[in-house]
Image: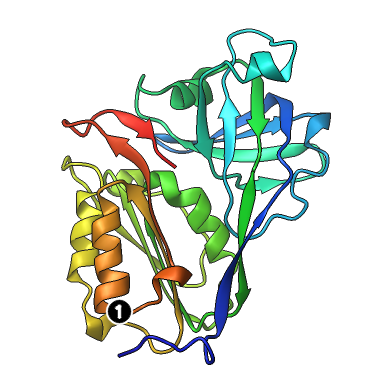
Amino acid sequence: MHLSNSTDARFALERSRVDLRFRFTRLASREWIGPDYVRVRVQGDDLAGFGEGLGHDDHIRIFFPDGAPSSVAEMREAPSREFTPLRWGEDWLDLEFAVHGDEGVAGVWAAGAPMGSLLGVGGPRGTLRIDGAPDAWLLAGDETAIPQIRRYAAAIPDGASARVLVEVADAAHEVRIDAPVAVEYVHRDGARPTSALISRLDQLTEADRPDGDVFAFIAAEQAVVKAGRSLAVDRWSLDPERIVVKGYWKADESGATYHAAH
């Protein structure tokens, strides 16, 4: 069995609370980095101090008001979704969106909102930090997980054992991700979302497990949770308290509608 004892574990996951704040920002730029994938930057004086105390994994709730709310209470009545903050500075914040035609308030806003449009930012409420250095890394997800995969990939030291798996629609929709290893893209090719990623995870056996203390991050449509835990916990014997496996969204019965779940 590969499971590390707590006494010889190379890393721990530390979760901590962050003071909850709500901020008003405005759309400053938009960059398409894939046919259905867009990065936006929002700016505003309210973002001062945004990144203080953040670790490797956290989520914010973003609000899409119709008009210009005059208070936080009014802003919080607007439609909202949870997202991973990608990068930030003194007065700016970058976010990335998977856009699915005219579905979903977030994607529609990201794809077409006029410059200067208001966006509310709430949180994060808490953060997760990797304390120590895993011997090896597994990062796997669909388009909705790319921002978080980017953040974890940036923490992988050169020379470390790592595997990065990303599901996208097809070869034309591959999104460049900077990582110290080659990213393996799996293609849906018209199949149900997350099915290609689940199939790839199911192909990994105990023999594919890297040596040492492994950190795993697996996130996509809700169906990935069972497959992810089957690999990480059952076949690779990873400590379930030191991995992150979650459903970021949930599809309807047809697989066509996207609902934020994380």
90 or 61, which lies in front? 61
Residue 30, by quadrant, is top right
- Please state, as top left, top right, bottom left or bottom right, where the N terminus lies in the image: bottom left
> At 51% across and 72% down in the image, what residue appears?
180
Residue at disc 1, secondary structure = loop
Task: Give the left or right position of residue 116, taking residue 199 as reference.
Answer: right
The residue singled out by tag 1 in the image is: 236
The relative height of residue 95 versus residue 153 in the rendered view (above or below) is above
Q: Name the colouring of the figure.
A: rainbow
Residue 102 visible, this angle:
yes
Q: What residue type is labelled 1?
A: Trp
Residue 83 at x, y percent in the picture: 53, 39
Q: Residue furthest top?
A: 67
Q: In front: 250, or 148?
A: 250
Whether residue 225 is situated above or below residue 102 in the rendered picture? below
Q: Nearer the viewer, residue 97 or 220?
A: 220
Which residue sits at x=71%, y=20%? Answer: 72
Q: Residue 204 placed where, x, y %?
A: 23, 73
**Position of residue 222 in the picture relative to residue 219 (left or right):** left
Q: Estimate the x, y position of residue 65 in percent, counting from the top left.
A: 59, 15
Decide: is 240 above or below 67. Answer: below
